[in-house]
Structure formats: structure tokens, C-alpha cells
Amino acid sequence: MTELKWWQTAVFYQIYPRSFADGNDDGIGDFKGITQKLDYLASLGVDALWLSPHFPSPNWDCGYDISDYCNVAPEYGTLEDFKTFLAESHKRNLRVILDLVLNHTSDEHPWFVESRSSRDNPKADWYVWMDTPPNNWQSCFDGEAWTYSPERDQYYYHYFMKQQPDLNWHNPEVKKAMWDAIRFWLDMGVDGYRLDALGTIFEDPALTPHTVPMNLAELRRFSDLAKTPEEIKLKDQYWHDMFKNQWGQAGVHELMKELRAILDEYDGDRMLVGEDDNIDYMGNGRDELHLVFNFPLMRTELITPEHIRKNQVERLTKLETLSAEKGWPCNTLGNHDTSRLHTAFGDKLYDSQLARLHAALILTLKGTPFLYNGEEIGMTDYMLTDISQVKDTMGAWYYHTIVTGMGVHPEEAMLRTAKMTRDKNRTPMQWSRQPNAGFSSMDVKTWLPINPNYKEGVNVKDQEHNPGSLLRYYRHLIRVRKDSSALQKGAYIPLKTTTEDYFAFLRQSQEQTVLVILNYSGKISELDLTSEKEFKNANLKILFSSAERRAGKFPPKFKVGPFEVFIAEVIRE
Ligand code: GLC
């Protein structure tokens, strides 16, 4: 078997810088704080860090509106602090990838400030300008996609907020400027990039209007109220139809090829992972992105064995078909844009058992796992109760639009807003049971409130000391994965593919075969694998179990307990 690259065997961990660790007590996370926590991350066993944007930004979209691509946001520190962080990470064998936002800049970026200043300045064509709004396109965050600029007496296009104008990627100068920024960090030694919203970079050149009989606010409201299967189907259709001319358009592949060629100039296997689930963005397997996220796995209300099996067949089959080199999978169940695992995929009765199963799923499936900070201690969504607390501007926009424009009662509007904003899953990391969860000192007002469940054991320090904690469980599982060639590189072979109670599969490398069973039911399941060909004359040796099990070998006919995570090596006698 060919040697795998570091990004194929690594466990990635996403850091949301604003909420990870506050090193200077201003209530906002920063590089000093992150650097102090690198030993923690190394001890967790992760191999690579993905940093959400750390660049200067007016923070209309929490850093995804960048005003300088070659610097560090002052609230996070200085370039020197970044370099220290990078060097200290590399010292601990932790790779670092950055967030790369290509589609848009901040409206405070000097490029846009210049572009907006007149119709004939040198950067006049760096963004997408029109004399009048050419269609009814919506911004996916805040209403109309075309915003008037009095300086030019023209409209600019933005897929996201009006403070995030879209760059005109047809202009070669834009490309050159952005590629320079990319090289700036690659030269410094970063190991790659996570590509933000790459599907939105180009628009339909015919500017075809959408056909949905609603605007964005109305569609959001319609979605909030949709109950019947017909309404739910219709709202999904509407979301697709509203934006289908604004993403997934021609041009992205060529751009990704150029970007890949830049990365390949560097040593050290620098890598690209795309915020898109479309495997086509991996090109022929060698000439576009190294990885794209398996988002379909998490786009479901319930994670069930049937859903996982179906997802795996579809993804893995497609990845095999890339023409030059097979594609490598990349699995995740959440990030800074989505509900936390406990909240998203719990059932209110067995949330913690299910969260453990989901962690095991991500760490045993074939492919590179991405974990989001705080999941390892079981952080949950935190619902804000007052509009003044809301930092996610799209949430505040929705609240005010439905209260003033649609007459929705403020109480109901707040409930809807708390659910839809991404603040709920971005609250500060909970380090201890000290006031402010040890994120900042006691008297500091943190940028978002701390989820009070830090006092109930949802914090790193308490869990460090508790052998049964989720943190210790994650650490243990990551170690098991690292020690197993099959779990890192082996093929995926599903077993017992009709059962709805548990998800069973093999991972098989040249050196090792490992059996994984995730019992998604509260019942004991009896398994008899003796007649399966992989188990002829074989015994099982436990590598990990969430239930109490004795060490030693036993035949492949056994019981798994309720919600048990069972991982065993198949030993052929
Ligand atoms: C991506 C980011 C999200 C951001 C958006 C606009 O989807 O993950 O947080 O708001 O792009 O940059």
C-alpha cells in the first residue's frame, strides 16, 4: 500500500479563535491563549489544527469578512504572536491550516474602499458592479444581494452580507493579489488551507433570476413554520431554487487547479480542504482539492445505521472513480456553523450516549476526521435570550426583519433567532469550573456568554480528573485510532447491512483487520459473525469498548451492550 500523506492519517481539530482561550483577559480568545493550550491539544492526540479566520476584520461575520489578508486581528495579537503559535505548534508535531475566504472581502478592505470610490479607479473592476440590480437575487444572510453605493451610483453584488462584497474573480489582478496573500502564509510555513464557501465564487453569467415567490426573510419565516412533509419538501426546494444561480457555477475548477499548483510548489505536502461536499472539486484526484467534507453525513436529523451505510456507499464509490488517483474521504459532524453534536443529534433521553457513538463514528470511519473545539467535553448549544446578546449579524438581521417587517412577537422572534444564529455553538470554550469557565478571569465580560453548564462538569479540568469523562473517552479513542493501521488506512467493509439497531463494519489494511460495532440502540444486540468469510477461524481481541469487558480473545459470536462502542482486532488463528 502506498504511504499515506500526513493529512490522510491526521485527526484535525478546528479552533474558533474568538472562543478558544483568552490570554490577555479582554473576554476574547487570542493567540497567546491558544499557544498556552497547545499542550492540551497535543495530549488530546490531535495532529492538525484548522483555525477559523484570524485576520483583521470588522467582524460583521465573525472574521469571515476580512479587511487585511496578511495580518492578524489586533484582538488576537500580532504577527509575531502568530509566528510563535505556529512554531510552538510545529514543535509539538501539530500542523496548522488557515481559513481561506476567496469569494468576498470585508467592505472595509482597502481593495473595496478603492473600488467603491469611483467608476474609474484602478480597482474599479475588482468587485461585481452593475448600474441597476439586474435580477431578484438574494443574499443568503441579509436580504437583497445588490447594494447601492452612492459614490459610484451603482450596485455591488454580495452573496453573503452587504458588508461582504463579492470579488470579481474574472479579473486577473484579483487573482494575483489573492495568490500573493496565500503565499505570504505558505512562505511562513502554514500547512494548508480550508477553503471557505468555494461554490459561491462565480455566478451565472446570464444572471438568471430565481423563481421562488418569496424573498429571503419570507423564505426563512416559511421554513420556520413549515410542519407538514409537503411544506418541508417545498421549503427545501425553495432554498435550492433561490440560490442555484449563485453557486456551483463554471470557473471554480480552473481556479482550484491554479491554487493547487501554487501549493504543490511548496515542500511538505501542503493541503487544501474545501467547504463543499462536491467530490468533483477534487478534480482528477491530484489537480484540485485534497479533501472535501462529507457534509451529507451530517445533513440529517437523526444519525442512524441506515443513514451512515447509505452515505458511505455513495461517498466511497464516487471517490473511487477519480481518474488519476482515488479520492480520500473526510468526515465531520459539526463546525462553527452548525449545532453542536449533543444538541443536533441527541434525542433528549440518551444525548450523552449518542454523542459518544458519534465521536466513535467519526474516529473509526475511513477518512480524515475533523473535530470542532469543545465537542471533546460535550459542549452543547446555548440559546441566547436577549437580542442585545446576539453577535451573529445574520441573526440580528432576521430578528429585526420579522419583528418590524412581519409583526412577529419579539418573544417568538427571539426564540427563532436563538435557534438559527450560530452564536449558540460559538460560546467560549469551558476550561474549568472557575467563574467564566476559566476562559477569562472572573470580572471580565466575555464576548459571548459562557454556557452555565461548565459548572456541571462540562469543562476540561473536571474531565481531566474523571476517568469516565467524555474528554478521556476522546483521548482514548484517538489513541486507539493512532495505534491501528486498519483504522487509519484500511478499506471499509460493511457488515450485517440490514440491521437498524447497530452499525457494524470492518476496516482492513494489509497489516490488520478491525471490527467496529456501534450499537445505536438501547438494547443488547446479539451478533453471530462466524459464518462471514472474514471471520473464518478467527477470534476477536478487544481494542476498545465503552462497556466493561475482560481482556483476552473470544470467538466472533457475542453480545454488544446498549449504546456500546465496540472495537476489536480480528485475529486469524
Ligand atoms: C462559510 C463560513 C461561514 C461564513 C460564510 C461566509 O460558510 O463557514 O461561517 O459565514 O462562509 O464567509
Image: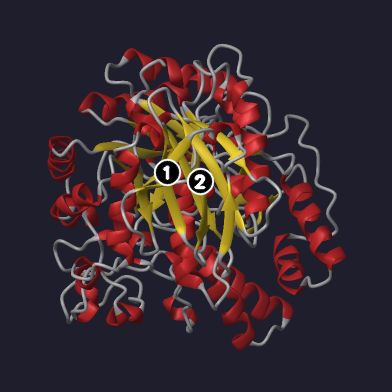
The answer to whether residue 55 shows anywhere in this view is: no
Using the numbered discs, state the Cα–Cα distance from disc 2 to disc 1 in whole angstroms. Answer: 6 Å
Q: Is residue 274 above or below residue 141?
A: above
Where residue 373 sits, quadrant-wise, is bottom left
SS class of the residue under badge 1? strand
> Which numbered disc, 2 or 1, marks the residue that appears first in the sequence?
1
Packing grade of label 1 (10 A; few <14, some 14-19, many >=20) is: many
Where residue 501 sits, quadrant-wise, is bottom right
Q: Residue at x 48, y 77 (%)?
A: 383
- With 165 as the anchor, is 204 left or right in this view? right
Dot 2 amino acid type:
Pro
SS class of the residue under badge 2? loop
Packing grade of label 2 (10 A; few <14, some 14-19, many >=20) is: many
Residue annotated with mark 1: 540
For this rendering, which residue is in front, 352 or 80?
352
Residue annotated with mark 2: 556
Query: Do the residues under discs 2 and 1 have CB atoms within 8 angstroms?
Result: yes
For this rendering, which residue is in front, 391 or 384?
384
For this rendering, which residue is in front, 30 or 346?
346
The x, y position of residue 301, in whole percent, is 64, 62
Numbered circles on residues, count: 2
Instruction: Indicate yes or no: mark 1 CB to ligand 1 under 8 Å.
Output: no
Q: Residue at x 36, y 60 (%)?
A: 549
Q: Is residue 508 above or below residue 471?
A: above
- With 146 as the anchor, is 114 left or right in this view? left
The x, y position of residue 346, in whole percent, is 54, 69
The quadrant of the image that shows the C terminus is top left
Dot 1 amino acid type:
Leu
